[in-house]
């Protein structure tokens, strides 16, 4: 099976999931999107209102900022990126997903990672960092430094929604993305072009 086929098969399973109560309260399952052959995987927290309506990750304001950042890095979602979330269904009123909800959904995310086999993972915000790496981890302490997840180079950085709330976080976040571009040149494509770094 190709990665695209494997991802589609997993998506079917996730669409039918009822392991936690979030599915009952949301409109659409936001499974993930992008290129299943991508070498960079982005992981967010969970769907918001726009994502819940459309079934697509990061399509609201935070997603638009994320697209601008990716563009500055010379990346686009269609070719370079696959995006998924810690939980696939929108928590009511955008609350942070509970430990039980995360635990129910985490095997799906791990399966997505296993299928995609990214060279680089970007963890967007505290929930992604804590959900995948360590429930006690602090994004303010750990952002900007490479860590390994299953031997994959993993960069925790601020969630784009945090950058919208506090624009002073944009400069340190940009340092993190510059490291990602460097790593991409090292591991994937020496000639990767980016106008800004
Ligand atoms: N925030 C997230 O963490 N994920 C989305 O898909 C959208 C907003």
Image (cartoon, grey):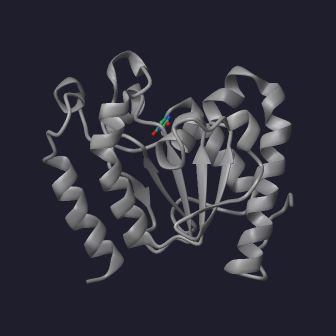
Asked whether, in this view, residue 158 is left or right of residue 37, the answer is: right
Asked whether, in this view, residue 196 is left or right of residue 117, the answer is: right
Q: Position of residue 119 (x, y in %)?
A: 59, 72
Q: Position of residue 112 (x, y in %)?
A: 37, 62
Camera sees residue 49: yes
Q: Nearer the viewer, residue 69 or 11?
A: 11
Residue 109's place in the image compared with 169, above or below, is below
- Name the residue rendered at 71%, 71% in the picture: 184
Q: Quadrant of residue 57?
A: top left
Asked whether, in this view, residue 13 is left or right of residue 95, the answer is: left
Camera sees residue 53: no
Residue 192's place in the image compared with 87, above or below, is below
Asked whether, in this view, residue 61 is left or right of residue 170, the answer is: left
- Name the residue rendered at 59%, 43% in the picture: 124
Q: What is the residue that sits farthest to the top in this orientation?
A: 93
- Name the residue rendered at 33%, 30% in the picture: 90
Q: Quadrant of residue 105?
A: top left
Number of disc labels: 0
Residue 139's place in the image compared with 36, above or below, is above
Q: Nearer the viewer, residue 49 or 25?
A: 25
Q: Position of residue 129 (x, y in %)?
A: 57, 43
Q: Position of residue 74 (x, y in %)?
A: 72, 63
Residue 156's place in the image compared with 146, above or below, is above
């Amino acid at each position: 099976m190709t990665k695209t086929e494997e991802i589609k098969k997993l998506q079917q399973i996730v669409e039918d999931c009822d392991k936690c109560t979030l599915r009952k309260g949301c409109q659409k399952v936001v499974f993930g999107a992008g290129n299943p052959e991508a070498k960079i995987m982005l992981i967010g927290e969970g769907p918001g209102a726009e994502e819940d309506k459309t079934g697509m990750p990061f399509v609201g304001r935070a997603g638009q900022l994320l697209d601008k950042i990716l563009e500055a890095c010379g990346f686009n979602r269609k070719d370079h990126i696959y995006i998924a979330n810690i939980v696939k269904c929108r928590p009511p009123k955008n609350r942070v997903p509970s430990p039980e909800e995360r635990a129910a959904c985490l095997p799906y995310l791990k399966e997505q990672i296993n299928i995609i086999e990214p060279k680089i993972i970007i963890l967007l915000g505290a929930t992604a960092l804590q959900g995948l790496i360590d429930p006690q981890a602090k994004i303010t302490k750990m952002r900007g430094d490479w860590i390994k997840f299953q031997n994959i180079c993993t960069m925790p950085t601020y969630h784009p929604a945090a950058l919208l709330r506090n624009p002073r976080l944009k400069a340190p976040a940009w340092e993190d993305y510059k490291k990602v571009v460097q790593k991409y040149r090292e591991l994937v494509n020496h000639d990767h072009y980016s106008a800004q770094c």
